[in-house]
Amino acid sequence: MPYDMLVFGGTGDLALHKLLPALYHLHREQRLPASMRIIGISRKLLARQSYIELAERHCRAQIEGKDFIEASWQSFSQRLEYFAMNAEQTADFSRLGHFLATDSQRGCIYYLATAPHLFESIASNLALTGLAGGNTRIVIEKPIGHSLQSALAINNAIGKAFSEEQVFRIDHYLGKETVQNLMALRFANALFEPVWRSAHIDHVQISVTETLGVENRGAYYDHAGAMRDMLQNHLLQLLCLVAMEAPVRFDADSVRNEKVKILQALKPIHGLDVRDKTVRGQYSAGQIGGHSTPAYYFEKDVDNDSDTETFVAIEVEIDNWRWAGVPFYLRTGKRLANKASEIIIQFKPVPHSLFSDSQANHLLIRLQPEERISIELMAKTPGKGMHLEPVELEINLAKAFQDNRRWEAYERLLLDVIENDSTLFMRRDEVEAAWQWVDPILKGWQQHYQRPRPYPAGSSGPEQAHSLLEKNARAWHQ
Ligand code: BG6
């Protein structure tokens, strides 16, 4: 059946910077269904031609020179349509119905690239006007709510209009190449399984650091903060993929069944544990790449007395057989010294050391800036005497597969929606289990009035984030 893709928030940053360039790439590689229209939707009164020009300006800026091919753009632009409407007015959905009704056999994929407060209204209006039938799918972006209660309200509203199989909750980290390689590494190589447990692993670090500040998103970010923006979703999803058991099959429900078990096994952090196991930070003025940057509370649309965290570090425990006693340290923050997303599996030292300079091994899984997996092993240095040094055994994924174009996460995920494969999307119970664990921490911060610790832009975050590991003689990987 032919499908159209309708992008609510069609003139917003996400649509213009990520979704349209990703759809263009899929079109250029002839992966989009031939008759699929892409319909941008927003309140702005725009003619179709103006929308095409807006899309072209952004796609040209986003897409690397050699990949922007004029002829492909011309044919891609023929798919583009535009529809102006108010997503809170039922009558406008009826108009949308007429606009689409040229062919009742077509299916619709609704992509909600809008502010989350519109999700409920869009879903219920689609249902009210008969636009949420069996031939439809809906894609929603994080954050899904700002607490368990609000996530339940969104999921209920979406659930009234669409069955769970029709709902795709996107987390773009799951579309990243190395994240999927993590599953390949764990479940396609017999080598790792025997040591992937508390008997051999000392601790795990999951670290997502950014150099960017809040840019133009101050209004959203000041109500969200690093916990809701990054940790509740991206970092917990990475944790699930590191910690989950092997699914029985590589299909949507088998994978998600295993992930949700991990989320349900996260040891709750409440009361005074919030103070001992979590660190909130907020960037102050500093220097990034030789440029001075302002303090967070001077950013556009941010309250100048804001106590929103732009950094969070947490010590997490998983209460199950495989992971009992193994801390998972999670940290994420904006305006830090560099941009890097990585997972470190730190193994225990050898049980009896023969060499004074021996160190415990670690496995590094780097998602960005480069895609790389490496193991640090101890080796003897050449020459006389048994002097050891760590050496890296590296899989450079970009080099190993240099003839393959690197896909952006959104390309893969959009194609999965079109092909109706929800393996890399979050199921309702996952989102709710994640909020269930996060809510008491947010409450604890409020109850104990734990203000974020300042850290200078361009640093590695607040001192307390280092103490979180140092108290157990550990340190963040540099
Ligand atoms: C988004 C967050 O989900 O992820 C942003 O809302 C963040 O605040 C971004 O900057 C980071 O994504 P990536 O792919 O650049 O690591």
Image (tube, rainbow, N blue to C red):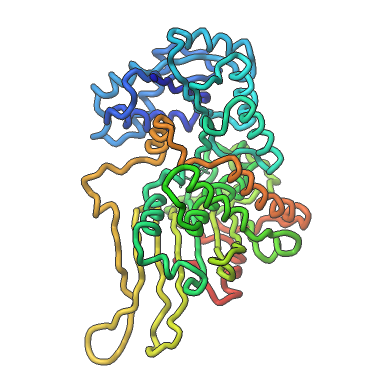
Q: Residue at x 43, y 9 (%)?
A: 103
Q: Nearer the viewer, residue 166 or 228?
A: 166
* Residue 18 in view here: no
Image coordinates of residue 257 in percent, x first then y, are 53, 48
1 relative position to 281: left or right: left
Task: Report the label total.
Answer: 0
Residue 328, image x, y percentages: 55, 63
Could one spot residue 23 in this view of the protein?
yes
Toward which corner of the image does residue 164 lie, by quadrant?
A: top right
The furthest residue to the front: 248
- Which residue is at a point 57% across and 50% down the rendered structure image? 260
Residue 110, above or below 228: above
Quadrant for the N terminus, please.
top left
Looking at the image, the residue that sits furthest to the bottom is 385
Point out the image quarter for the C terminus: bottom left
Percent from the top left, x then y, of residue 41?
Answer: 50, 19
Which image quadrant for residue 366?
A: bottom left
* Residue in the image at 24% along x and 44% along y: 404
Relative to residue 199, is residue 354 drawn left or right?
Answer: left
Q: In terms of depth relative to the viewer, which is nearer, 42 or 171?
A: 171
Q: Residue at x 45, y 84 (%)?
A: 351
The residue at the far right in this view is 447
Left/right of residue 204 with respect to residue 433 in the rendered view: left
| Depth order, front residue of 468/161 | 161
